Image (tube, rainbow, N blue to C red):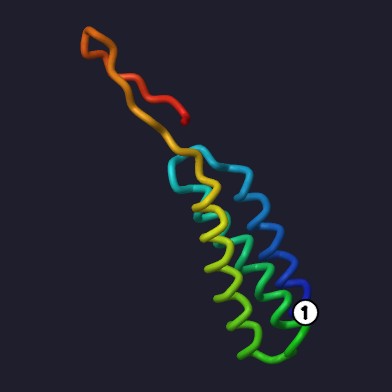
Amino acid sequence: MKKLAIAGVASLGLLLAACNHTPGARITSGALVGGAAGAGIGQAIGGNTESTVAGAAIGAGTGAAIAAANEPRYCTTYDRYGQRYDYRC
């Protein structure tokens, strides 16, 4: 039953990872996917609640950090009329 719940959470995280329409959404989905993967690894290695929770926490932190490092950056420039332009840099 636990493996089915872990697989469900991992699948949900992967589905949410495809929905990156707002700024910062990549960090949220990275934390979800990392947390689900960490929980699965913690459960497989330790087999108890403490290792599952620790794996989920470590995975969520790592996933959020990796996603934040890969977040697209936006730069702003202005033309000679003062019109603002945002673009990926």
- Residue 63, by quadrant, is bottom right
Residue 43 percent coordinates (x, y):
72, 82
Nearer-the-camera pick, 43 or 73: 73
Q: Is residue 6 left or right of residue 55?
A: right
Q: Which residue is mark 1?
A: 1
In the displayed image of the protein, which residue is found farthest to the top?
Answer: 81
Considering the image in quadrants, where does the N terminus appear? bottom right
Compared with 69, 1 (above or below) is below
- Residue 57, by quadrant, is bottom right
Label 1 sits on a secondary structure element that is loop
Residue 13 percent coordinates (x, y):
63, 57
Q: Is residue 63 left or right of residue 73?
A: right
Compared with 87, 8 (above or below) is below
The structure residue drawn at horizontal position 57% and vertical position 57%, both measured from the top left corner, is 66
Report crowding for label 1: few under 14, some 14 to 19, many 20 or more residues within 10 A (C-alpha).
few
The structure residue drawn at horizontal position 74% and vertical position 89%, both measured from the top left corner, is 47
Residue 40 percent coordinates (x, y):
72, 74
Query: The residue under label 1 is which amino acid type?
Result: Met
Residue 2 percent coordinates (x, y):
74, 79
In the displayed image of the protein, which residue is found farthest to the left?
Answer: 82
Nearer-the-camera pick, 53 or 82: 82
Nearer-the-camera pick, 77 or 1: 77
The structure residue drawn at horizontal position 69% and vertical position 91%, both measured from the top left corner, is 48
The structure residue drawn at horizontal position 60% and vertical position 50%, both measured from the top left corner, is 16
- Residue 7, by quadrant, is bottom right
Nearer-the-camera pick, 21 or 74: 74
Compared with 56, 15 (above or below) is above
Q: How many marks?
A: 1
